[in-house]
Image (cartoon, rainbow, N blue to C red):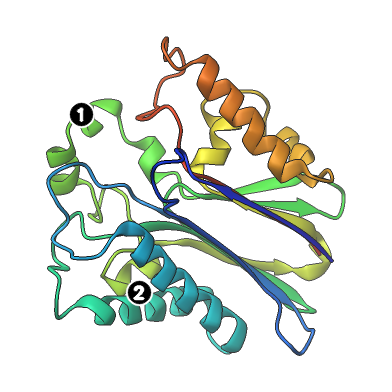
Amino acid sequence: MRTDLVSEPGAANRPNEDFAAVGLPASGQGGCVIVLDGVTPPRGGTGCLHSVPWFTARLGGTLTELTVSRGDLTLAEILSRAIGRTAEAHAQTCDLSHPRTPQATVALARWSADTVEYLVLSDSALLLQGADGTVTPVLDDRLARLPRSALATDALVDATLRNKEGGFFTAAADPSVAARAVAGTVPRREVRALAALTDGATRWTEKFHEGDWQALFATVAKQGGARSLVDRVRELEAADREERAFLGRSKTHDDATVVYAEL
């Protein structure tokens, strides 16, 4: 198999809040891809002593370990346990009930000789390429379906939409949100390759409209394609820095992560 991973911060003067991993068990059977996008909090605090990178590293590390070692658990069960373990690591020092407690989006895939399992929570994306070359996006579009007026203020989002029924869900401190993820299983023979991306990379399709998911996947599947995709996103962001002609970008540059696995 071939893998390709690129993760780049949105700015050189701040840490990357994304997490990415490829897990290949020592048995040589199967593997997994994990991508998290830490949610940057606005000013005003999170009720937590720890940073978003601390949280994504803890959650991502636990997800990697469980996804590789616990084949008897579904991906939703693994995410639930990982959120619980991460919450336990700072429950005594932090207010985990705060709506801005550190949190992340999740894109997760695991494959064996027979199946490919997938899970997506919030606005990271997972793309599955079929045996015939067709690309199927796995998306949790709850956030995208909300009217822009509903996202007018951070306080409104926190009070009525964040990790609330009728809003959207992220991996924060409540293990039960794992049941809200978009998840499923397909036969391994039906998947040739896959890619997991944070929304800083999916801007190529979702914000700048450079091509559809099929075209994005074709770019990533090329040798060095993950790097070229992120570079192209950076060029598009820089060109639109002042005009902001492409709506829905809260910041000029975002952390961008792409993981590609050719099964």
Mark sitting earlier along the chain (2/1) = 2
Q: Quadrant of residue 113?
A: bottom right
Q: Is 161 on the left or on the right of 28, as rendered?
A: left
Identify the mark at residue 248; answer none if there is no mark: none
- Relative depth, front residue between 145 and 42: 42
Give the image location of residue 47, x and y in percent. 13, 61
Q: Residue at (29%, 60%) from the top-left corner?
A: 51
With respect to residue 91, does 151 lie above or below?
Answer: above
Identify the residue position indicated by label 2 in the image: 83
Give the image location of residue 11, x and y in percent. 44, 38
With respect to residue 184, does 5 lie above or below?
Answer: above
| Mark 1 crowdedness (10 Å alpha carbons): few <14, some 14-19, many ≥20 | few
Identify the residue position indicated by label 1 in the image: 152
Q: Is 162 on the left or on the right of 25, as rendered?
A: left
Q: Residue at (38%, 60%) from the top-left corner?
A: 53
With respect to residue 217, does 147 lie above or below?
Answer: above
Q: Residue at (84%, 46%) from the top-left corner?
A: 223
What residue type is disc 2 on?
Ile
Q: Can you name the residue that lies furthest to the right here? A: 132
